[in-house]
């Protein structure tokens, strides 16, 4: 308070808090301007300064200011069911409930336990937990034994000291501190413990007992060698050797690298397998667990007094030495830097070269085709473990879509001496060759009173040429198809007799593939051959035209060419007829034909040396 009669020297307070909200206060009640400040003196005495009156704030603070960073902690647990376990049927999960007074939010956390194997940590994230009619308040956690969050029942066992003081200040009952219940697994683990007797430990287990036995007159080396000095001197010192075990002399044996560890503290040996990436082996690194390694070959001794067993010592190991590990030979070819220093061979150290010349991998060969499915599918099964569909030529599919070559075929006797039956001689088929994927389909038109049901004779598929032995021939291509050709399809021989108009035009347009449909080339070859046989050709074809019509059919032309010694197949003959047939009636004008090879039919004189030919 300001003393009466004295002048206030402090600054007027203009800010105050009303109902928890800061507001600006008027400077004076009358609203007049503040008095002008007095001029500063040249000097002032600090003792004249009076303390300013303390400003008093009226009203209460908001909860987020009053309870900032104030948290109530309740200790609880819940039971978790355990199925399919003989040792326990439920498990106790300990947790802590945090209640934040500033915003009435709650979060539940479970303290992490080392090597528990259970995901622990935040059990429920911080937020307001709803309940019927609102949210959970701190009063809901007081005076109850259990609390339920989202269907999970938590048993309360106590609270921390701050929470207890807060509840006492609020006049609420403080939770009673209880002990956590014992888990069923704890009783099971307790039952597994061995019952300890009250007697002294055995000499082989205790160094002090062994010392006392020796002090009473019994030598300690008789009881067991003293290992304490060796352990204290060589603890954490390990010799590491790199070795290899060659077991290729046995069936399915292999040459495998290993790492041998010799523990100087207790003269034990452990052998680990050097796991190599992409070796195709399961990762089982331990070949021999840490134990004493018997020296030499190990045999089964059924006598009551087998004698003293000798074990491998550090002096038995070295670079280039072969040790016997339970009747398995291991070659020590290298060691680490610590081992070299321990043996004192840093300067004259030389490792054993165990690298063998690598054999070239065997060539990749496909197995013999067994006839099931297509050869392409069989190849895909051999190339990859997971078969993939055969990649098709996309451009060929797009350019040759709906392009089909059709031929009329008949069954013929092949070169193997097979004879056709009487019914097969008159059977007629239509062979369709699909240029999009080089497949063949055969259809048999139904014939009345033939006794054979027509229809699909061969499903559309890729057909391969016959090959010698177990070899697989290449597929039939479009270049193998022409009139007169004989195709062997699944031990049946088909001869192509005729082709439709589209097929003939396609073959003539692609004469670089179908060489028997190149009319210009065939006529030029005929001219070169017939230069020396002009008179004979004229006489033969005059004799063939017995009806005097001046036209020759394809069959007459074939007989004529054979008469002068010129072999032509049916496709070449069809090409020549289509080239020289000017009116499209399937016949060739004799004069036009002879003019292509020189001469005129009216100028010919019969040659008695050439005998006439019949049709």
Image (cartoon, rainbow, N blue to C red):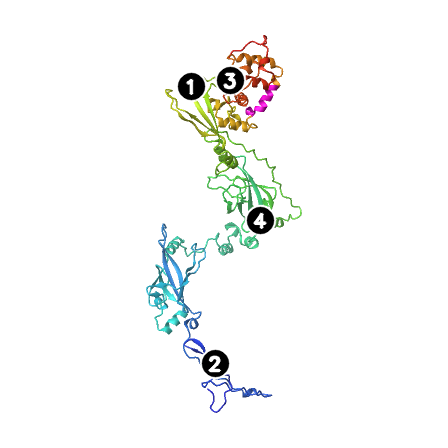
Q: Residues within 10 Å of mark 2 (few under 14, many from 20)?
A: few
Q: Is residue 517 magenta?
A: yes
Residue ID for mark 3: 553
Residue ID for mark 2: 14
| Dot 3 and dot 1 residues touching (CB under 8 Å) | no
Q: Between disc 4 and disc 1, whose residue precedes?
A: 4
Q: Circle 3 — which element?
A: loop
- Res 117 → quadrant: bottom left
Horizontal and vertical percent for residue 171? Answer: 35, 73
Q: Is residue 261 magenta?
A: no
Q: In the figure, 459 relative to 169: above or below?
A: above
| Dot 4 and dot 1 residues touching (CB under 8 Å) | no
Q: Circle 4 — which element?
A: strand
Residue located at (50% from left, 52% from top): 218
Q: Residues within 10 Å of mark 3 (few under 14, many from 20)?
A: some
Front label number (1 vs 2): 1
Residue located at (57% from left, 14% from top): 601
Q: Between disc 3 and disc 1, whose residue precedes?
A: 1
Residue ID for mark 1: 426
| Dot 2 and dot 4 residues touching (CB under 8 Å) | no
- Describe residue 417's horizontal placement relative to residue 351 as left or right: left
């Amino acid at each position: 308070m300001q003393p009466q009669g004295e002048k206030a020297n402090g600054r007027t307070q203009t800010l105050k808090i009303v109902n928890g909200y800061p507001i600006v206060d008027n400077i004076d009640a009358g609203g007049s301007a503040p008095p002008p400040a007095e001029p500063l003196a040249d000097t002032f005495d600090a003792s004249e300064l009076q303390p300013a009156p303390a400003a008093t704030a009226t009203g209460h603070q908001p909860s987020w200011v009053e309870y900032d960073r104030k948290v109530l902690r309740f200790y609880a647990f819940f039971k978790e069911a355990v199925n399919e376990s003989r040792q326990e049927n439920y498990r106790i999960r300990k947790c802590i409930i945090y209640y934040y007074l500033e915003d009435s939010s709650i979060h539940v956390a479970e303290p992490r336990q080392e090597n528990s194997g259970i995901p622990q940590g935040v059990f429920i994230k911080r937020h307001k937990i709803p309940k019927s009619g609102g949210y959970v308040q701190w009063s809901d956690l007081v005076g109850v034994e259990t609390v339920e969050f989202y269907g999970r029942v938590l048993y309360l066992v106590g609270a921390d000291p701050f929470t207890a003081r807060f509840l006492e200040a609020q006049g609420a009952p403080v939770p009673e501190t209880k002990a956590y219940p014992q888990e069923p697994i704890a009783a099971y683990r307790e039952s597994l413990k061995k019952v300890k007797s009250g007697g002294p430990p055995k000499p082989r287990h205790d160094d002090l007992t062994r010392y006392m036995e020796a002090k009473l007159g019994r030598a300690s080396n008789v009881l067991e060698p003293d290992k304490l000095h060796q352990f204290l001197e060589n603890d954490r010192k390990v010799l590491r050797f790199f070795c290899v075990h060659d077991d290729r002399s046995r069936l399915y044996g292999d040459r495998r690298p290993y790492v041998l560890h010799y523990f100087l503290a207790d003269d034990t040996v452990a052998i680990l397998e050097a796991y190599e990436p992409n070796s195709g082996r399961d990762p089982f690194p331990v070949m021999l667990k840490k134990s004493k390694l018997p020296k030499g070959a190990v045999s089964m001794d059924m006598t009551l007094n087998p004698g003293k067993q000798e074990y491998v010592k550090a002096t038995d190991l070295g670079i280039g030495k072969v040790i016997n590990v339970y009747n398995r030979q291991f070659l020590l070819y290298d060691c680490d830097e610590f081992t070299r220093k321990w043996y004192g061979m840093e300067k004259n150290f030389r490792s054993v070269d165990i690298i063998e010349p690598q054999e070239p991998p065997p060539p990749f060969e496909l197995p013999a085709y067994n006839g099931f499915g297509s050869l392409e599918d069989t190849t895909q099964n051999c190339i990859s473990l997971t078969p993939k569909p055969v990649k098709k030529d996309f451009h060929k599919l797009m350019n040759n879509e709906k392009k089909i070559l059709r031929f009329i075929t008949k069954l013929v006797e092949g070169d193997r001496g097979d004879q056709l039956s009487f019914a097969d001689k008159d059977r007629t088929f239509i062979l369709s060759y699909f240029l999009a994927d080089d497949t063949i389909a055969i259809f048999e038109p139904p014939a009345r009173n033939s006794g054979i049901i027509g229809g699909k004779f061969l499903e559309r598929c890729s057909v391969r040429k016959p090959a010698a032995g177990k070899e697989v021939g290449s597929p039939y291509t479009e270049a193998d198809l022409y009139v007169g050709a004989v195709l062997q399809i699944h031990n049946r021989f088909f001869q192509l007799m005729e082709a439709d108009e589209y097929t003939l035009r396609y073959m003539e347009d692609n004469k670089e593939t179908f060489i028997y449909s190149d009319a210009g080339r065939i006529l030029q070859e005929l001219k070169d051959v017939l230069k020396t046989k002009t008179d004979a050709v004229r006489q033969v074809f005059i004799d063939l035209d017995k009806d005097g019509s001046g036209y020759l059919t394809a069959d007459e032309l074939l007989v004529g060419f054979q008469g002068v010694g010129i072999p032509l197949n049916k496709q070449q003959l069809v090409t020549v007829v289509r080239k020289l047939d000017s009116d499209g009636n399937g016949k060739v004008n004799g004069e036009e034909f002879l003019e292509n090879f020189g001469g005129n039919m009216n100028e010919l004189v019969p040659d008695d040396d050439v005998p006439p030919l019949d049709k």
